[in-house]
């Protein structure tokens, strides 16, 4: 199993998630991450419809010419031309005129990997995740896509790993149920779980954590800030789980803020460090855009947190659950 750093960078933001980012900012973000010791980058064809992979590949070619950084990307969507002129599609702004089309079949996985290699300028991929399986994304089509993956796409992932073209394989999802389902069907080296094991959702992933202990599967936690609310706080919150936060969530964040303030710890520092306390968690990958966010993340990662704070935020979470 490939060794994953405890802190990485999620790259959806440099694919213009929610707002446009220029090429220079994307390049400088990756350069600052590398300079700060962040050597793991997670990306996907879906992020800006190839834009994030292209920008990451260009930045790493310039600032990591020997290919020492670890890169994970994903399969499950193919990018097809579109005539849409919409400024924002699927949350991404000013992205290329391509439309992501779900396809978890054997051939589609191989096509997706070949395209990602070109954009990333890499022949070998460190980690390959099947992206967004499950009912949360697919609704009534979830069973069909799952069958395509188990019967086809997974076989492609195994073949790539066995041939040494990929270091590790797994899934990248936003829900626990599909992880438990797949662990009963196939072998997964690593699971990227976004937004379900956070300071705000402390117990949602407990069944999965126990299952991963049994199988030896490692967890990577994405979305430690729950799409931003655990950085912005209750007053400025704009996103929770990729959407505007409901009042109950804002109230829970306010309780967590009060608990953190009593120990003079930034809410974001507690949010970033919370998942890293679990031994099954190999790493945490907040989404970053700009050298200032990289610098802030490094401060949060190193912020001293007393054990008493974890008791306090646990109590605050239970009180508002």
Image (cartoon, rainbow, N blue to C red):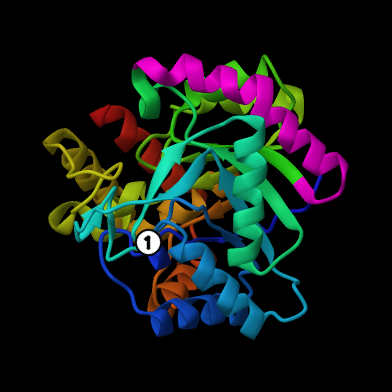
Can see residue 281? no
For the residue labelled by badge 1, is the local secondary structure a helix, a strand or a loop? loop
Picture residue at 49% right of the left edge, 25% below the top:
176
Q: Quadrant of the N terminus?
A: top right
Q: Which secondary structure class fits the magenta region best?
A: helix
For the residue pair 258 and 194, the one nearer the viewer reads as 194
Work out which residue is located at the far right of the displayed protein and give it. Answer: 163
Kindly indicate the quadrant of the structure image that contains residue 195. Answer: top left
Relative height, residue 138 to residue 114 (above, below) = above
Q: Quadrant of the C terminus?
A: top left
Can see residue 153? yes
Kindly indicate the quadrant of the structure image that contains residue 218. Answer: top right
Please tell me whether residue 143 belongs to the stretch shown in magenta: yes
The spot of residue 184 in percent (x, y) is 67, 14
Instruction: Please state the extent of the stretch shown in magenta in the rendering.
Output: 140-167
Relative height, residue 53 to residue 64 (above, below) = above
For the residue pair 291 and 107, the one nearer the viewer reads as 107
User: Which residue, given by chain and number where applicable, does mark 1 sit on?
Assistant: 265
Relative height, residue 283 to residue 196 (above, below) = below
């Amino acid at each position: 199993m490939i060794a994953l750093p405890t802190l990485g960078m999620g790259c959806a933001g440099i694919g213009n998630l929610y707002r446009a980012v220029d090429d220079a900012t994307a390049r400088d973000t990756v350069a600052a991450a590398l300079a700060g010791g962040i050597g793991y980058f997670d990306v996907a064809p879906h992020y800006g419809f190839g834009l994030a992979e292209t920008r990451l590949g260009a930045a790493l070619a310039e600032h990591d010419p020997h290919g020492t950084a670890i890169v994970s990307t994903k399969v499950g969507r193919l990018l097809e031309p579109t005539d849409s002129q919409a400024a924002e599609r699927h949350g991404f702004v000013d992205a290329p005129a391509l439309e992501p089309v779900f396809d978890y079949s054997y051939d589609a996985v191989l096509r997706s990997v070949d395209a990602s290699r070109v954009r990333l300028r890499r022949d070998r991929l460190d980690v390959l995740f099947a992206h967004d399986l499950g009912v949360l994304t697919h609704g009534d089509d979830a069973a069909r896509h799952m069958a395509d993956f188990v019967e086809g796409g997974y076989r492609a992932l195994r073949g790539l790993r066995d041939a040494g073209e990929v270091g590790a394989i797994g899934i990248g999802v936003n829900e626990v149920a599909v992880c438990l389902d797949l662990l009963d069907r196939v072998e997964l080296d690593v699971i990227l779980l976004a937004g379900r094991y956070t300071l705000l959702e402390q117990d949602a992933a407990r069944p999965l954590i126990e299952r991963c202990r049994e199988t030896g599967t490692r967890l990577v936690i994405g979305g430690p800030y729950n799409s931003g609310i655990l950085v912005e706080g209750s007053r400025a919150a704009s996103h929770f789980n990729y959407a505007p936060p409901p009042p109950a969530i804002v109230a829970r964040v306010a309780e967590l803020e009060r608990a953190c303030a009593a120990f003079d710890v930034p809410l974001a520092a507690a949010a970033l460090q919370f998942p890293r306390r679990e031994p099954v968690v190999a790493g945490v990958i907040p989404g970053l855009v700009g050298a200032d966010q990289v610098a802030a993340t490094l401060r949060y990662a190193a912020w001293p947190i007393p054990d008493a704070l974890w008791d306090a935020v646990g109590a605050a979470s239970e009180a508002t659950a």
